[in-house]
Image (cartoon, rainbow, N blue to C red):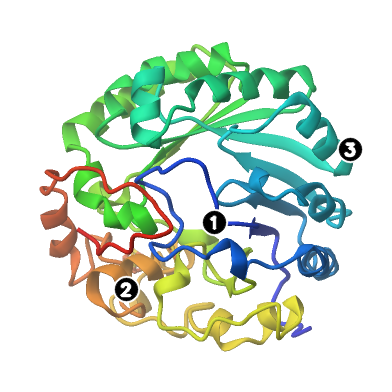
Amino acid sequence: MNATVPPPWAMLAEVTHGCPLRCPYCSNPAELVRRSAELDTADWSRVMKQAAALGVVHAHISGGEPLVRRDLAEIVAAAEGIYCQLVTSGVGLTAARLAELAAAGIDSVQLSVQAHTAAASDRIAGRASFAAKERAAAVVKDAGLPLGLNVVLHRHNLDTVHEIIELGIAWGAARIELANTQFYGWGLVNRRALMPSRAQLARAARVVESWRHRTDVELIWVVPDYFDGVAKPCMGGWGAISLTVAPDGRVLPCPAAYGLPLDLPSVRDHQLEWIWSESPAFSAYRGTDWMPEPCRGCPRKTEDFGGCRCQAFALTGDAGRTDPACVLSPDHGLITELTRKNDAEFVYRSMSHRPAAT
Ligand code: SF4
Ligand code: FES
């Protein structure tokens, strides 16, 4: 291994893009990987072993909905020595299935919820699923596994953050991630439908702060970078701490990099170690040498790494520019303009539909 590149800490294993839900904010690419193109059990087992050898300590077993893979327990069992978190919609998570997965090595569960009522949650998910989520939360608690809740926030649920936190506490979550929508994949397709107002965000942020004094539950507020004027330290830096393996074996420096003009390496052709430390895709924006001005001369460049490459590409067509979310970016006006556009209906995620961004 290239000794100058520290090993990754985390891996997102997107074992499938298949999913019973149709959330319009999904971070999966608009062009989803079909089930027939997925890595098989032996491929995924090899990936897990290579990840452990490379130094990965935390794997998010995700999708789509990972439970649609009948061989999921075999894949998890191959990740020996890695802390494994199941990231699930909860649909299909029975006590028997969780027992099988826990025996294979699942250490914790992150459950997605779309809103605090069945009607609102099911409308956003594009299918009746709230009741299954409630049952799944109980199954996780009964199994004695740590439960986290993930709620993607946007203009259709931001005004109910208080009720969402109450729901998470009632369901026994130890951690509630309140993730303001990041506009990638289907989230980018639905940007106009999901865009909140500045007033909504300010109110919700105050509600979250007020809860911090009232509960021991860990509350994570993922910042809405379109509104802050500050670029986020996306992925903790390109090729710095984590990698994503797509259902078909492509390996990405971040889960939204499907659309970037990169030659994405595949575990079908290369070892994970070479991909991480040597491949052109992972080297492209690693460190600070690639940066243009104003990042190049900016004191924050080792804190935010110039922001997000996917956002720079989505908004300017050039992944090597300063993230337009930064107020110092010459392209910052693009973001301010977009925050005023919030007038579209949901385009629900689907395998067959390839819509353009709004
Ligand atoms: Fe970060 Fe670049 Fe903006 Fe400086 S100019 S704050 S490094 S994005
Ligand atoms: Fe890809 Fe930020 S989401 S670098």
Identify the residue position indicated by label 1 in the image: 17
- The Cα–Cα distance between marks 2 and 3, rounded to whole angstroms, is 42 Å
Give the quarter of the figure containing the N terminus: bottom right
Of the pair 41 and 145, the residue shown nearer to us: 41
User: Where in the image, quadrant-wise, is ligand 2 located?
Assistant: bottom left
- Residue at image coords 48%, 20%: 212
Q: How many numbered discs sit on the rendered protein? A: 3
Q: Nearer the viewer, mark 2 or mark 1?
A: 1
Residue type at tag 1: His
Identify the residue position indicated by label 2 in the image: 313
- Residue at image coords 63%, 16%: 172
- Residue at image coords 70%, 86%: 269
Q: Is residue 246 depicted above or below 278 in this figure?
A: above
- Residue 343: x percent and y percent? 11, 43
The crowd level at tag 1 (other Cα within 10 Å; few <14, some 14-19, many 20+) is many
Drawn side of residue 239 relative to residue 11, left or right: left
Identify the residue position indicated by label 3 in the image: 103
Let me know if residue 247 appears in the view: no
Let me know if residue 82 appears in the view: yes
Sequence-wise, the earlier of marks 2 and 3 is 3
- Residue 2: x percent and y percent? 74, 85
Residue type at tag 3: Ala
For residue 337, the mark is: none
- Residue 170: x percent and y percent? 56, 11
The crowd level at tag 2 (other Cα within 10 Å; few <14, some 14-19, many 20+) is many
Residue type at tag 2: Phe
- The Cα–Cα distance between marks 2 and 1, rounded to whole angstroms, is 23 Å
